[in-house]
């Protein structure tokens, strides 16, 4: 078993941050809100996998961690694209 304290602290900070981001983005009524939240959730899931890879099945959880970072990036790109597309339609 191999746990790094920094990964656990990072996970805790991320969970608190996603809660705050959810509250802030919900109040702003941001277009693409669901995609942004899904992207942030994918980052938190990746960090959970980072912690789990230190406990067991390191290859599997390492692969899942990087896959979820890719997914989060794609979700952020889609959210930005959706916002840009809607701004073009309003003009």
Image (cartoon, rainbow, N blue to C red):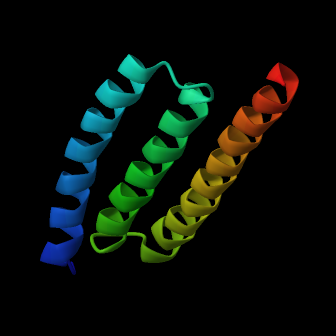
Q: Is 50 on the left or on the right of 62, as rendered?
A: left
Q: Nearer the viewer, residue 30 or 9?
A: 30
Q: Is 2 on the left or on the right of 44, as rendered?
A: left
Q: Nearer the viewer, residue 60 or 31?
A: 31
Quarter of the rendering containing residue 19: top left
The residue under the point 48% across, 35% down is 37
The residue under the point 54% across, 28% down is 33
Across and down, in percent, residue 74 comes to 69, 52
Rendered position, 53 above or below 85 = below
The residue under the point 49% across, 64% down is 65
Rendered position, 67 above or below 26 = below
Quarter of the rendering containing residue 16: top left
Q: Nearer the viewer, residue 78 or 89?
A: 89
Rendered position, 58 above or below 88 = below
Quadrant of the rendering where the C terminus is positioned:
top right
Across and down, in percent, residue 32 comes to 62, 29
Quadrant of the rendering where the N terminus is positioned:
bottom left
The residue under the point 54% across, 38% down is 36
Across and down, in percent, residue 28 comes to 42, 22
Across and down, in percent, residue 52 comes to 32, 63
Q: Is 48 on the left or on the right of 88, as rendered?
A: left
Farthest front residue in view = 91
Numbered-mark total:
0
């Amino acid at each position: 078993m191999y746990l790094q304290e920094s990964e656990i602290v990072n996970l805790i900070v991320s969970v608190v941050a996603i809660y705050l981001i959810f509250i802030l983005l919900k109040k702003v009524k941001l277009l693409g809100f669901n995609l942004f939240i899904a992207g942030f959730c994918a980052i938190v899931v990746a960090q959970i996998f980072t912690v789990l890879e230190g406990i067991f099945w390191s290859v599997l959880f390492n692969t899942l961690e990087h896959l979820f970072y890719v997914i989060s990036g794609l979700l952020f790109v889609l959210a930005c694209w959706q916002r840009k597309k809607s701004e073009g339609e309003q003009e």
